[in-house]
């Protein structure tokens, strides 16, 4: 039996450059034959992970090349009274431990004590590594650590105790090229957000003046351009509930907390790109969540294959109309019924707005998220 939790949102951002490409321009894509604004899934997932940190730091893994530094910070105080302790010896032991990780492809540490690859490890996994280094400190100072120590070090990362996985790794997965056996398949899929309508690139020409320039001297002392756009984005993500519970070793209570935090973060977290220049803090004004059992997930982006044109009307509302119409059409096509709810901004949609394919309307986004988590719990029971 499969249970999928899907979330759909329409988010109309004011002029902004939330997610840049290699030239500094807002990312875009062709869809339905026209250019659309785009914000990558990685960008939104990063924002959600940052949102998680405010909820519970233990829920968020570190993606870093500075594992040696993290371990040094944990171990200096614990080993300072050891007879073989010195800063050099500690760094040597940590370096040997880190380079012992992996199989045929081991992790390498450079002169700056950074690993050659980004490692994605939970706080509990880093703590477990630190404990092994503390317990095996003399052995790690030898020319070559014992096979048992190497095995114990590798077991610290998602080894015999798989409960060390953090919530964000359980949701978004991880890929460790040097340790493929530690890879984690994601329980969540996040789509690239695309605009429901065609967009054109625009340019902001800016200048800056030297505050200490003599008054009789004309001209700017710096000038440049920033590309930006404004767009109503369709956003979509889906969580495989059974996979999330399995990734968290059957801890249903933690999975429910993680699901709640993910749905909260999906709605509340914003990309930070160029926000000091644009301050585009515009929350979604249409949010729908569906809890599906034994049916395939449905990204409804094809509702906007033909771009929305809303001259003199609300772009968000016109987009919502197309979205709900597509949802209803697919339910009719596949003879399924929606188990969904939605919430809208009343000033745009009014109190009596009906999104036909999106189930019943709830009063607020918090009530919508609470309904989804309760519905998953009810089905689980």
Image (cartoon, rainbow, N blue to C red):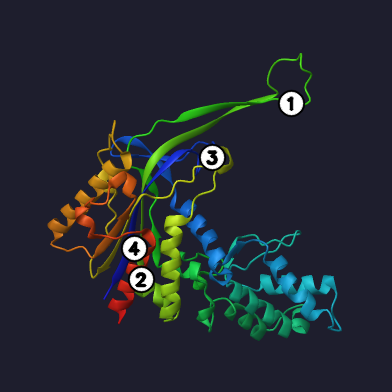
Q: How many neighbours does mark 2 have within 10 angstroms: few (below 14), some (14-19), or many (20 or more)?
A: some
Residue 73 in picture, x, y percent from top left: 74, 70
Labels 4 & 2 near each other (Cβ < 8 A)? no
Residue 158 in picture, x, y percent from top left: 53, 77
Labels 2 & 3 near each other (Cβ < 8 A)? no
Figure check: 108 above or below 24:
below
Q: How many neighbours does mark 4 have within 10 angstroms: few (below 14), some (14-19), or many (20 or more)?
A: many
Residue designated by label 1: 210
Q: Pick the quarter of the image with the C terminus.
A: bottom left
Task: Tell me the mark number nearer the camera, choosing from 2 and 3.
Answer: 2
Residue designated by label 3: 22
Figure check: 79 above or below 230:
below
Earlier in the chain: of badge 1 and badge 2, it is 1
Q: Is residue 365 visible?
A: yes
Figure check: 68 above or below 246:
above
Residue designated by label 2: 373
Task: Tell me the mark number nearer the camera, choosing from 3 and 1.
Answer: 1
Residue designated by label 4: 368
Task: Tell me the mark number nearer the camera, choosing from 1 and 4.
Answer: 4
Task: Tell me the mark number nearer the camera, choosing from 4 and 2.
Answer: 4
């Amino acid at each position: 039996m499969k249970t999928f939790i899907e979330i759909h949102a329409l988010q109309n951002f004011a002029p902004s450059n939330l997610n840049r490409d290699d030239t500094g321009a807002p990312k875009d894509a062709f869809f339905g034959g026209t250019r659309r604004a785009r914000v990558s899934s990685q960008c939104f997932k990063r924002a959600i992970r940052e949102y998680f940190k405010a909820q519970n730091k233990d829920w968020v893994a570190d993606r870093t090349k500075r594992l040696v530094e993290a371990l040094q910070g944990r171990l200096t105080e614990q080993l300072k009274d050891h007879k073989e302790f010195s800063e050099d010896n500690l760094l040597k032991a940590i370096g040997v431990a880190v380079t012992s990780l992996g199989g045929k492809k081991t992790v390498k540490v450079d002169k700056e004590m950074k690993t050659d690859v980004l490692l994605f490890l939970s706080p509990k996994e880093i703590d477990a590594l630190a404990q092994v280094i503390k317990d095996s400190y003399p052995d790690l100072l030898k020319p070559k650590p014992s096979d048992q120590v190497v095995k114990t070090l590798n077991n610290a990362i998602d080894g015999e105790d798989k409960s060390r996985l953090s919530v964000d790794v359980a949701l978004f997965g991880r890929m460790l090229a040097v340790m493929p056996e530690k890879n984690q398949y994601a329980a969540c899929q996040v789509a690239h957000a695309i605009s429901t309508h065609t967009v054109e690139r625009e340019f902001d020409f800016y200048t800056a003046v030297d505050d200490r320039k003599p008054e009789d001297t004309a001209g700017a002392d710096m000038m440049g351009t920033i590309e930006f756009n404004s767009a109503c984005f369709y956003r979509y993500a889906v969580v495989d509930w059974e996979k999330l519970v399995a990734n968290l070793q059957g801890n249903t209570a933690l999975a429910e907390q993680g699901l709640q935090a993910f749905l909260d973060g999906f709605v509340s977290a914003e990309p930070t790109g160029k926000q000091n220049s644009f301050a585009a803090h515009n929350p979604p004004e249409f949010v729908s969540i569906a809890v599906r059992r034994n049916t395939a997930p449905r990204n409804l982006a094809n509702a906007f294959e033909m771009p929305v044109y809303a001259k003199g009307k609300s772009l968000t509302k016109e987009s919502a109309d197309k979205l709900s119409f597509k949802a209803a059409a697919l339910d009719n096509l596949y003879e399924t019924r929606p188990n969904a709810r939605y919430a809208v901004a009343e000033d745009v949609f009014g109190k009596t707005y009906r999104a036909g394919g999106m189930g019943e309307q709830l009063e607020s986004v918090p009530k919508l998220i609470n309904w989804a988590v309760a519905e998953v719990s009810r089905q689980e029971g």
